[in-house]
């Protein structure tokens, strides 16, 4: 009997999972209708228009007919991976042909590719979504290359769009896959619960079933809940928490003994979105899918959660309470913020580069006339003012050079580099500046530091920039200390000073371009330094206590360095 019931449960679970997969057909067809509409509108309002009998017209008709044909395909066949892959590839080709036939290479029509990526994500497969992103960027690159003979695959706009394509594909695929896991977990939990109820009913009529077997089944059910990484919380009709698995404890940071037996709205930090969502499910019978809420842990940290709720029903469909499945989406939020920040910095870089180029022309004229004025016979006062103009023009030229250096793509030419030698060279070049600022330079270099494979000029710029900033930070003199070491898997460079330090509220802002704590300067030094290190596969961190100086730590991973050296 145990084997038969297990087979029955396995069959029911498989049917539930098939139902979950088949339910996405309507969503995929809806997205395809939206894609058809956008493609047709694109062709109608393009320069060539949508003329009967043309290639664009036939493409629109073919796209429309394909969606009509797909709507008649049986659900069990539509859910097959082969059919889904063919649909995604065909859609990507349709969109590419539409852009090609309407000459929309340099427009924002490439955004329609994201609908194709979302269609791929509906398979709830990260691999399929990423492959769709790769197909989309490949076709888009081919279109742009066809439209422009000067196309460079390493150009900044194309790279940014390519990275954005893959980030969206990864994010949507990851979210869809996690949703699939949550749905499967909920289905398994419901199936096990119903199986437990069925067995309990059998127990009433069969006295030979022992209490130990019932306990074993209960423990088995509990093991399933505890093995699920997502948080699972169950409340009864009075909103008292009856189940709180290990995954829920890890996500919220709250042990089960502080939650079980309590009303969900009485848990500190849960009162707003999280508890309210569960309460609405119980009181208003309002189930939610993938809603974003926040909780506050004991330390005051806000934790973003993605929550899905459903009503808990008995075998006769009586509502017993609610089930909430949730997970920490901090990494997803960080990825979204990283994408937004990347887009913002790319736009700022383009604008800054354009402005700098426009200023440089008039600036050369001003500097030239000022130098001419100072060289002619004129009063000392006139010559003095002319020299001031020349000096300020040179300062503006330096600022423009920094802006252009930050905006352009960093190209790395790797060669064997002795980091200790660069530190010694920079220290000598700064001796006079340090002497005038009453700063003593101290170095502590590890003699066995391995030779790294890097761009020597870029590495020297990093050391010089950090050391110069440290000297400028010590207005009343002090000690500049530069150390190198090999720590585990990394080659480390530390530059520290005994200045006033950096206030805590500003420490997260110093990496932003055009932000500076000094009256003079462009605020690009640390931004450029960070970009150089990231291009080398390295990192830079800051530790500073106000009033006790600051220390910048640069790390290059040895494995990556040695791999480049072998090349």
Image (cartoon, helix red, strand yellow):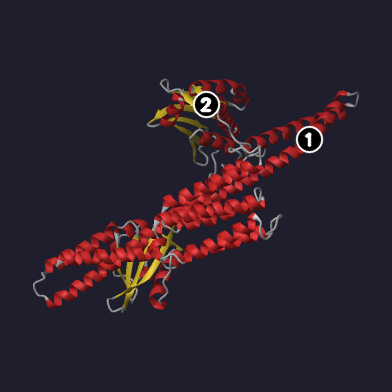
Q: Residue 414, which numbered label? A: 2
Q: Which residue is drawn at 91% across and 23% down?
A: 377
Q: Nearer the viewer, mark 2 or mark 1?
A: 2
Residue 526: give x, y in percent of width and height. 57, 37
Q: Is residue 21 above or below residue 541?
A: below
Question: Which residue occupies the extreme front position in the image?
Answer: 53
Q: Which residue is drawn at 54% across and 41% down?
A: 502
Q: Is residue 253 above or below residue 341?
A: below
Residue 88: give x, y in percent of width and height. 49, 54
Q: Mark 1 points at which residue?
A: 361
Quarter of the image for residue 62 reads: bottom right
Label 2 crowding class (10 Å Cα cut-off): few <14, some 14-19, many 20+? Answer: some
Question: Which residue occupies the extreme left position in the image?
Answer: 208
Query: Which of the two discs, 2 and 1, labels the residue nearer the N terminus?
Result: 1
Residue 23: give x, y in percent of width and height. 41, 66
In terms of depth relative to the viewer, which is nearer, 521 or 161?
161
Q: Is residue 460 visible?
A: yes
Q: Which residue is drawn at 50% across and 35% down?
A: 552
Quarter of the picture holding the N terminus: bottom left
Do the residues under discs 2 and 1 have CB atoms within 8 angstroms?
A: no
Label 1 crowding class (10 Å Cα cut-off): few <14, some 14-19, many 20+? Answer: few
In terms of depth relative to the viewer, which is nearer, 336 or 134?
134
Residue 187: give x, y in percent of width and height. 32, 65
In terms of depth relative to the viewer, which is nearer, 549 or 443?
443
Q: Can residue 31 be seen in this view?
A: no
Cα distance in 3D space between marks 2 and 1: 34 Å
SS for tag 1? helix
């Amino acid at each position: 009997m145990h084997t038969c019931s297990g087979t029955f449960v396995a069959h029911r679970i498989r049917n539930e999972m098939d139902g979950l997969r088949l339910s996405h057909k309507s969503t995929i067809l809806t997205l395809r209708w939206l894609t058809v509409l956008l493609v047709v509108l694109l062709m109608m309002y393009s320069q060539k228009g949508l003329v009967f009998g043309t290639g664009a017209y036939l493409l629109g008709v073919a796209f429309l007919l394909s969606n009509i044909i797909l709507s008649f395909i049986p659900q069990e066949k539509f859910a097959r991976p082969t059919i889904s892959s063919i649909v995604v590839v065909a859609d990507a080709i349709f969109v590419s042909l539409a852009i090609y036939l309407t000459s929309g290479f340099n427009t924002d029509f490439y955004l329609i590719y994201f609908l194709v990526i979302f269609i791929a994500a509906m398979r709830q497969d990260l691999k399929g979504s990423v492959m769709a992103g790769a197909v989309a960027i490949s076709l888009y690159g081919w279109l742009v290359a066809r439209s422009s003979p000067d196309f460079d695959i390493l150009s900044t706009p194309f790279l940014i769009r390519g990275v954005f394509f893959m980030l969206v594909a990864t994010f949507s695929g990851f979210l869809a896959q996690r949703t699939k896991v949550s749905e499967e977990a909920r289905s398994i939990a419901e199936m096990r619960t119903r199986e437990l109820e069925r067995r309990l009913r059998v127990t009433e009529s069969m006295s030979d079933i022992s209490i130990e077997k019932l306990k074993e089944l209960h423990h088995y059910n509990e093991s399933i809940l505890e093995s699920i990484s997502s948080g699972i919380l169950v409340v009864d009709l009075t909103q008292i928490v009856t189940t709180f698995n290990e995954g829920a404890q890890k996500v919220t940071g709250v042990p089960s003994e502080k939650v079980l037996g309590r009303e969900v709205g009485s848990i500190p930090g849960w009162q707003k979105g999280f508890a309210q969502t569960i309460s609405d499910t119980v009181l208003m019978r309002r189930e939610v899918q993938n809603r974003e809420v926040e909780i506050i842990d004991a330390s005051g940290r806000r934790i973003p959660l993605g929550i899905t709720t459903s009503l808990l029903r008995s075998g006769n469909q009586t509502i017993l309470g609610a089930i909430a499945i949730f997970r920490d989406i901090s990494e997803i939020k960080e990825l979204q913020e990283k994408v937004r920040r990347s887009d913002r910095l790319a736009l700022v870089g383009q604008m800054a580069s354009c402005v700098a180029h426009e200023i440089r022309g008039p600036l050369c004229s001003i500097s030239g006339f000022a130098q001419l004025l100072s060289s002619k016979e004129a009063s000392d006062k006139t010559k003095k003012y002319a020299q001031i103009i020349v000096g300020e023009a040179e300062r503006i030229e330096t600022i423009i050079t920094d802006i252009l250096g930050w905006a352009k793509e960093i190209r790395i030419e790797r060669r064997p580099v002795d980091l200790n030698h660069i530190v010694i060279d920079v220290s000598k070049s700064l001796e006079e500046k340090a002497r005038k600022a009453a700063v003593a330079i101290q170095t502590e270099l590890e003699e066995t530091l391995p030779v790294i494979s890097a761009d020597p000029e870029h590495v020297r710029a990093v050391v010089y920039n950090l050391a110069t900033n440290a000297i400028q930070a010590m207005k009343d003199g002090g000690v500049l200390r530069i150390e190198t070491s090999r720590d585990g898997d990394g080659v480390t460079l530390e530059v520290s000073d005994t200045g006033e330090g950096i206030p805590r509220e500003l420490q997260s802002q110093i990496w932003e371009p055009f932000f500076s704590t000094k009256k003079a300067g462009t605020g690009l030094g640390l931004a450029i330094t960070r970009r150089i290190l990231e291009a080398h596969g390295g990192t830079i961190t800051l530790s500073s206590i106000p009033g006790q100086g600051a220390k910048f730590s640069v790390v290059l991973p040895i494995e990556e360095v040695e791999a480049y050296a072998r090349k």
